[in-house]
């Protein structure tokens, strides 16, 4: 078996003129647009979840009263749906190619 050796001389280096490659950013304008749309959905979802807690009735904290508004459709169905849709849009924005 013969040993394979690569022999280089100083003259071999620097003879090839390498053009510097242009560094391209992975995300394009469309990616950022979709990211902002997804972020808007997430923010709207969290804003829809806001409201008084279970013991706040007419703006006053009363531990002896129960507020059924914490179980409203807006707070337990619509708002989380907006947040999940926002996260799905964010994943799409990250994986989308130019």
Image (cartoon, rainbow, N blue to C red):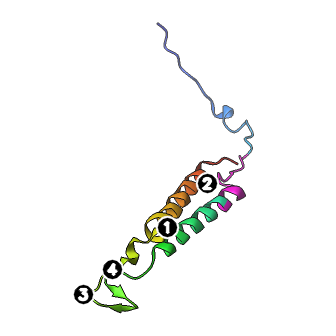
Q: Which of marks 1 and 2 is nearer the N terminus?
A: 1
Instruction: Decide whether residue 95 is among the magenta residues.
Output: no
Q: Comparing marks 3 and 2, which lies closer to the viewer? A: 3
Residue drawn at x 74%, y 44% is 19
Q: In this view, does 50 lie to the left or right of 33?
A: left
Q: Which of marks 1 and 3 is nearer the N terminus?
A: 3
Residue drawn at x 59%, y 48% is 95
Q: How far apart are marks 1 and 2 (CA)?
A: 21 Å
Which residue is disc 4 drawn over?
Answer: 54
Q: Earlier in the sequence, mark 4 or mark 2?
A: 4
Picture quadrant of residue 37: bottom right
Instruction: Decide whether residue 30 is among the magenta residues.
Output: yes
Q: Earlier in the sequence, mark 4 or mark 1?
A: 4
Q: Comparing marks 4 and 1, which lies closer to the viewer? A: 4
Q: Where is residue 64 in the image (x, y as percent from the top left)?
A: 24, 87
Q: Comparing marks 4 and 2, which lies closer to the viewer? A: 4
Label ID, residue 93: 2
Which residue is disc 3 drawn over?
Answer: 64
Residue drawn at x 46%, y 6% is 1
- Outermost residue, top side: 1
């Amino acid at each position: 078996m013969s040993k394979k050796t690569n022999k280089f001389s100083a003259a071999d280096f620097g003879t090839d003129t390498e053009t510097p490659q242009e560094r391209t950013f992975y995300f394009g304008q469309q990616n950022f647009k979709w990211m902002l749309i997804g972020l808007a959905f997430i923010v709207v979802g969290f804003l829809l979840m806001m409201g008084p807690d279970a013991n706040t009735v007419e703006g006053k904290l009363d531990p002896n009263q129960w507020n059924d508004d914490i179980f409203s459709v807006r707070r337990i169905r619509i708002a989380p749906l907006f947040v999940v849709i926002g996260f799905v849009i964010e994943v799409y924005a990250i994986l989308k190619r130019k």
